[in-house]
Image: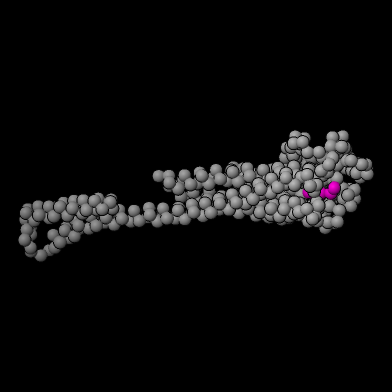
Amino acid sequence: MAHPSESGSEPGSAGPAEIPPPRTRVWRGGKLEAHDFPVAEVSDYLDQDDTVVWVDLCAPQRADFQVISDELGLDPMAVEDAVSRHERAKIDRYEAYAFLNVYVPHVRDGELVLHEVSAFLADRALVTVRQGPGFDIDALVRRWDASPGVDIGETGAGYLLYGLLDMVVDLQLEAVQSLDDEADEVESMIFDESFPVREMQRRSFRLRKNLVALRRVALPMREVVNTLLRRDLRMVAPALAPYLQDVYDHTLRVGEWTDSLRDLVANLLDTRIALQGNRMNEVMKKVTSWAAIIAVPTAVTGFYGQNVPYPGFSAHSGFIVSSVIIVVCSVGLYAVFKYRDWL
C-alpha cells in the first residue's frame, strides 16, 4: 500500500518533464470568462469586481509557488505546508484565507493509494496544489461545470471548494466500497473447503492495513467540513450550508463504514483462528484414532513374538488366534471411532 507517510512520491507519478503546467480559470458574474491565462494575471482579475479565480498547481517547487504566493500574499508557513508532502488532513485559518490539506484514495489491485491535495481558500480565489498528477483534476472541472443551480458569483470560491470536498469524499466512499468487496471475498475464503490459509492471511493483513490508512485520512475530514459549516467563522457563503452538510453526512458515513469494516476484519481473523483450531482438532482425532487401531496389531504381534512357550507357541493355531484378535480388535475400534465421528 502506498501511504502518504511511507512513499516519497505517488506511484505512477510522472517525471518532472511530464508535470502539467498550471491551470487557471476566472468566472465573472457566475459565468466562465477565461481560462489557462498566466498565473501572473491572477491579481489583475481579482482587482476587478464580481470575479472568482481558480489556480491549479501540480507538484510545484518552492520557486514555482513564489508567483502565486506573491499574487495572493500567502503566509510562508502555509506555503511550506502546501509544498511539503505527508501533511495530515486538516484546515488552518489565516487572516485573509484558509488552508486545507486532504487525501484522495484509490484502490488499485487491492492496494490503497493516497494522493495528497492542498487548497488555499479566499473569498474570491481558490488555489489547489496537487503533489502529483494522480488526482483527476479534469473530473473536478467537469463537476464544477455541472453546477446544480449554484451561482458562483454569489457563493464565491466557496462553491469551488465544495466541489473539491464533495469529490474527495465521494472517492473515499468508492474506496470503502472496494475494501468492503475485498472483505466479502476474504469472508468467502474462510469457508472454502480448500482453506487457502496463506492467501487468506496475506489478503486479511493487506485489508486491515488499508482500512487503518483510509481511516487515518478520512476521520479528519469531519473536522474540516465542520469548521467550514461554523457560521461564526463565515468561511463560506450561507447558501452553501446545505451542500456542505451533505458532504459532512458522507464523511460520517465513511468513518462509520470504515469502523464497521475494521470490526468485521477482526471478527474474520478470530473466525479463521477458531476454524484452524477446529480443523486441527479434527486432524488430531483422526491421527489418534488410527494410532490406536495400529497399536492393536503391534501389541498382539509383539506378544506372540515372545521366545517363551505359551498356548499356541510354534503352532498353526497360535497364528490363527492372533490374526483373529487383530482383526476383531481393529474392526471394533474402527467402528467405535466412526460412530463417535472421530474418523
Foreground: 34 or 300? 34
At 47% from the left edge and 44% from the top edge, which residue is drawn?
188
Measured as percent of width and height from the top left, residue 340 is found at 26, 53
Measured as percent of width and height from the top left, residue 66 is found at 87, 50
Q: How is the image coloured?
A: one colour
Quadrant in the rendering for residue 93: bottom right
What span is in magenta?
A: 119-123
Foreground: 122 or 25? 122
Residue 66 vs residue 317: left or right? right
> How many numbered discs?
0
At 76% from the left edge and 54% from the top edge, which residue is drawn?
230
Foreground: 295 or 207? 207
Residue 144 vs residue 249: left or right? right
Quadrant in the rendering for residue 27: top right
Q: Is residue 179 magenta?
A: no
Residue 44 vs residue 61: left or right? right
